[in-house]
Amino acid sequence: MNNKEKELLEEVVGKDPTNSDSYNIRKNGKSVDRKVNPNIDIVSKENNSGIDVYVKEDTLFGTVNIPVIITESGLTDVVYNDFHIGKNANIIIVAGCGISNDGHWDARHDGIHRFYLEEGAKVKYIERHCGLGVGEGKKVLNPVTEIYMKKNSYMVMDTTQTKGVDDTIRTTKADLEENTTLVITEKILTSKDQVAKTNFEVNLNGKEASTHVTSRSVATGDSYQEFISNITGNTKCYAHVECDAIIKENGKVKAIPEIYAKDIDANLVHEAAIGKIAGEQLMKLMSLGLSEKEAEEVIINGFLK
């Protein structure tokens, strides 16, 4: 890979994905490298674009890296990836897409990921998106995540959009059965005239199912962000949704919560806070010798960690 492609991979996964137990690297709409092992198999779909990842039951602490990079202006890439996590498996999955667009046409990636967790399975899913390049064409990312959790399963989803993504619609849907837990943390940074919209839909169908959704966002310049959450409790369950946002310059953030209790024992909570950087925080850092701009960057970076 050339230097631009290596930079994109580093932005997405943070390190060389070929050091992982298993991986699939996708570049400009095609799979270019892959590794499997006896416990984790990756199979190309026959009638569609994408892969099926099969994790055997009782697999402990396996890792899968499936980064996507796009460097062709004008390319639209749609991929369907399904993850089949066996009973009592414990797995880390690292995914995401980096687009570098130096041309005049939009470059776009739509990644549709579906997770099927068997009883007792545990998944940590890390997803990262970014845009690079100085062309007039937009960098567009529209990730879709569907999660289906069977009894006693557990999943953590940590998703980050760093810089340079012009337009994004991020959709997450989840169905939780008995005694399952889903923890989602989302972090989004927008600038200039970028637009980011997030939709969460979680159905708590089994007794003692629980979810904790946290969204942290920073909107600067003339950018716009929209956070929509729709949590439904169909039985005895627990949900906590929190949306925290910082706005700078002409940034705009809209939070639209919806919680729907269909059972007397459904305990659902939503919190939202939107505002500018606190003056006390700035003054404290500036007293240490930082400029106002440097102090703002420190606060924003800490907020999005």
Image (tube, rainbow, N blue to C red):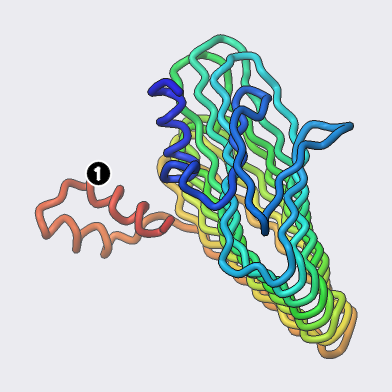
Residue 204 sits in quarter:
bottom right
- Of the 4 image quadrants, the one containing the C terminus is bottom left
The residue singled out by tag 1 in the image is 293
Does residue 265 appear to the left or right of 94 in the view shown? right
Does residue 173 appear to the left or right of 304 in the view shown? right
Q: Amino acid at mark 1?
A: Lys
Does residue 92 appear to the left or right of 52 in the view shown? left
Q: Percent position (x, y) of residue 196?
A: 61, 41
Picture residue at 70% right of the left edge, 22% below the top: 76
> Taking the image as drawn, is residue 133 in sight?
yes
Extreme-bottom residue of the structure: 265
Picture residue at 67% right of the left edge, 59% below the top: 39
Picture residue at 58% right of the left edge, 22% below the top: 138
> Taking the image as drawn, is residue 182 in sight?
no
Extreme-front residue of the structure: 38
Measured along the vertical axis of the image, is residue 104 above or below residue 149?
above
